[in-house]
Image (spheres, rainbow, N blue to C red):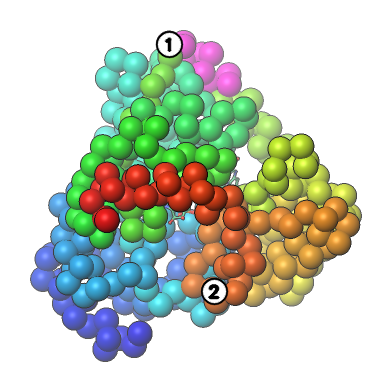
Amino acid sequence: MSDATWQPFVQHCADAGLQIDTNVAMAQRTTYGVGGSAAVVVVVHSESDAVALSRAVAQCQVDNIVVIGRGSNVLVSDEGFGGVVVLLGAVSPDSAVGIEGDVVQAGGSVLMPVLARRSVGAGRGGLEWCVGIPGTVGGAVRMNAGGHGAEMVDNLIDARLVSLKSGNVCVVPNADLGLHFRGSALSQHHVVLSARFQTSNITPEEGTATINSVVAWRREHQPGGRNAGSVFVNPAQGEGSAGALIDGASLRGYSRGNAVVSEKHANFIQANEHATAADVVAVMTDVQQKVFEIHGIMLRSEVALVGFDASIAERFSDPRHSALEQNDARAHLSRLLGDL
Ligand SMILES: Cc1cc2nc3c(=O)[nH]c(=O)nc-3n(C[C@H](O)[C@H](O)[C@H](O)COP(=O)(O)OP(=O)(O)OC[C@H]3O[C@@H](n4cnc5c(N)ncnc54)[C@H](O)[C@@H]3O)c2cc1C
């Protein structure tokens, strides 16, 4: 759509007092630091903003929407994204984590390391592993992020969601979120506003020691620089980790353009200076192909591909996300949120 085509939507949002901008460079919004611009960006600062946005979406029949948190699991195409990017406004990290008894609540835009450290500081345990995830609580719920033997589904009580399709806000229990390995039943128009976690008693000293060991492990095993963590999702149980399969194809250091398979972690693809999203996708394509030739296993992307051709998105999409039970979970969640 051209700028003129977006004008009614932009006007609608502006009239509702929403923070909206057009033609916004997305590179600085993702940890890959590559890619083009989004046609429209709306920043949601409150629940009522989100509901107002849903009215504009319905009025203008917008269906190309993506929510971006820290952008640590996203690759935006060089051509950009011809739709609406929704960002959760900056909220003070100090005020956005609330602790009541053994329940910790956090806003969707709270960074996971902040969640971990604030919980530990208050003597609440179980979320220490979150210090290793450089994303937001909202993105982590959507992805069922995990590491160090834990994942979101373990501690999550419920999440407060808004559907940008129906405008309904609903607190959805863990069991209805369809959380599975690095995925959930959330659709693109579902926004995590906040989440609540069950925690246990610990001393701040115990928690700090765990946090320090997670941070040390990450420094030792994962590269710095521009990447989105593990690119490929682990295949089915018993087929080895994606990283081990890539290692089995001797692909550490493999590069196309300015993107390269990390020497430190085979499942990380680094975007070096002057890298483009196309470079990253070229490395992904070759890695997928070579691993298939050697191991007969088709790796699928954990990283969300935004603004790419359907054929590229299809090549990397994980069929497990569209398995029958996941479709059922998605339909159930959509019913809860009044989308259907
Ligand atoms: C160095 C590094 C290490 C990493 N290690 C791990 C790891 O150990 N384990 C792991 O699981 N992941 C890991 N990741 C990936 C990433 O940090 C997680 O997936 C994280 O949860 C993504 O959060 P985000 O806010 O950056 O989401 P984004 O990357 O912005 O978005 C990811 C997905 O979530 C959706 N989304 C974002 N915010 C919201 C919201 N508020 N409501 C609804 N949907 C939303 C997006 O539409 C997209 O589909 C790593 C990444 C990096 C760069």
Residue drawn at x 16%, y 60% as measured from the top left: 52
Q: Is residue 139 left or right of residue 51?
A: right
**203 inside magenta stretch:** yes
User: Label 2's element?
Assistant: helix
Image position, residue 290 (x, y; %)? 83, 62
Quarter-wise, where is residue 34 in the image?
A: bottom right
Q: Which residue is mark 1?
A: 201
Q: Nearer the viewer, residue 150 or 311?
A: 311
Residue 310's disc is: 2
The reply to whether the magenta stretch includes residue 9 is no
Where residue 105 appears, as percent x and y from the top left, is 31, 30
Asked whether residue 276 is in view, the answer is no
Q: Mark 2 vs mark 1: which is more N-terminal?
A: 1
Q: In the figure, residue 182 lies in which quadrant? A: top right
The structure residue drawn at horizontal position 47% and vertical position 32%, both measured from the top left corner, is: 153
Q: Residue at x 20, y 68 (%)?
A: 58
Mark number, residue 14: none
Asked whether 205 or 50 is in front, the reply is 50
- Amino acid type indicated by mark 1: Asn
Looking at the picture, does residue 30 appear above or below residue 160? below
> Residue placed at 64% from the left, 67% from the top?
315
Secondary structure predominantly adopted by residues drawn in magenta = helix
Compared to residue 193, the image places residue 289 above or below, namely: below
Question: Callout 1 environment at 10 Å: few (<14), some (14 to 19), or many (20+)?
Answer: some
Residue range highlighted in magenta: 201-210
Q: How far apart are the alpha carbons under marks 2 and 1?
A: 47 Å
Q: Nearer the viewer, residue 210 or 2?
A: 2
Q: Is residue 180 left or right of residue 252?
A: left
